[in-house]
Amino acid sequence: MLAIRLLGAGDYGHVATWLSLFVLYLSLNSSAFTMLVVRLMAAGSDAVPIDREAATAAAVKFSICSLAFLAAATVLLSALVVRLSLAGGEPPAGFGTVILLMGLLTAIQIGVALQAAIIEGAGRLDLATKWQLVGPLAVVAVLATSFVTGIAFRADAYLTLLCVGGAIDMTLLWNARGALGLSLSLSASLAGNSSGVLQLLRSGGLLQATSLLNVFLEPVNKFLLNHFTGSASVAIYDLAMKVIWGIQHLVGAAMRVFLHIGSQDSSAVGRTFVKAIALLGVPVVTMHTAGTLFLFGVARYWMAIDGTQLMILFGVATISNLGMIFVTPLYLSLIGRHDLIFIFRVQALLAVVNVLASCVAIPLFGLVGAAIGLLVATGLNVVAIYLRCRIEAEVFNNPEVPLLRTKRRVVLAIGLLVASIAWATTGGGQPLVLLAILAGLGVMMAGEPLVSRMIDQFIPGRT
């Protein structure tokens, strides 16, 4: 939202449209790096004799090939996009340079992903995650400062800022990898054969095909909404789903430890799954409550739109998102044990059911129909993944996990979530209700083990 205000809707639209192509290319690489993490984690298991150096070497060779193709495509696209009027409408001045900066940003992000995968593969997910937060925070700080001071941004300056943020992450990850004694083994990768790269491409390609099924859903739902209900509903849908996917990705990053568990000890998945749910249950529900209040504020004070449909849409989508978040550990454990064919099939089922359900629900229920279609598909997806992992009922009686206490707090958290959605849907006319919701969230989160651990990280020696 800050970028839209600083660049203007027109210039930002051009940047966002073309940058989405580079993001798609980056996602094609990210699946290969995910499989690199799985292979590096499996290298520590006696049951899976994989050479860690060979796996890293294959990833380096893959990255070199990917960067070479990216450079050629970026230069060609930069030369043609303005000359052939491919940008559509009137692009900002120097748009060819903007395309080059997009290519540079993508190259930096590929380097960041490679470094992070090597660090995560060594069992240091905390470092891989922590050092990727500095760059985005620096970018947001600069944008916020520019917004407050009234300094406008050009498109090329915005892309340059993003490149600087990526370079910060790249530098920090490079230093962290060196401190852990993890090398890139460039010479070994160039001397080795191509079998490792081909294996990485095969497994990463299958995983990427699975991811593309999810990418496919967004434009389809938007097209159906635009056709049946008009373009305004597409904007409301996009706003709500940005928050939904943001929460899902935030929590999903923390659950990537299940890649390691699935590749090393599949019998431990059930026990760890129960502990993860007990630890993350209340914080995840609370994030959706905060998202509700955030969307209400944006709808009323920033975008001046009717928030009723937005809140109903977000409420239904929240149910789907909670199911997907809590099944994510099992999904990642399946990747860890290379059950990629099943993952592809179940995600294909998700895509087909979502499209069919949306085609029926959107004409009947309008904007909310898109969320209903997602809910139906997600329900089938969650059940299929849970049954595939065969979680035994006995693990839920783990004496180490106070499930009864967790259930009570989750019920309270869900009650506050429902109250916040109801309050926002009816117009938010009772300030005391909002204060009660905020007070309830504060009291509840203060006693959460996850929150206490996070505070201990920032305040060492706290009693």
Image: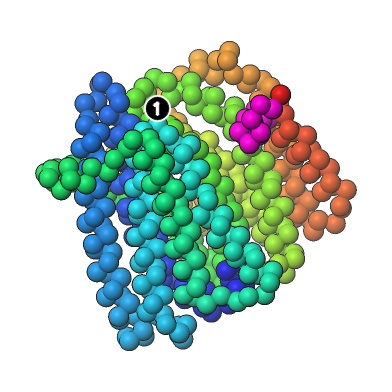
Rendered residue at 37%/41% (across/down)? 177
The answer to whether 53 is drawn above or below residue 294 in the figure is above
- Name which residue type carries label 1: Ile
Q: Tell whether 347 sits left or right of 66.
A: right
Report whether residue 384 is seen. no
- So how many labels did they put on this image? 1
Q: Which segment is the magenta one?
A: 448-462
Q: Main secondary structure of the magenta part?
A: helix
The answer to whether 377 is drawn above or below residue 227 in the figure is above
Q: Residue 454 occupies which quadrant of the picture?
A: top right
Q: Position of residue 65 (x, y in %)?
A: 22, 56
Q: Tell whether 111 sits left or right of 197.
A: right
Q: Position of residue 403 (x, y in %)?
A: 62, 21
Q: Tell whether 170 sits left or right of 458.
A: left
Residue closest to the far top: 399
Q: Residue 455 occupies which quadrant of the picture?
A: top right
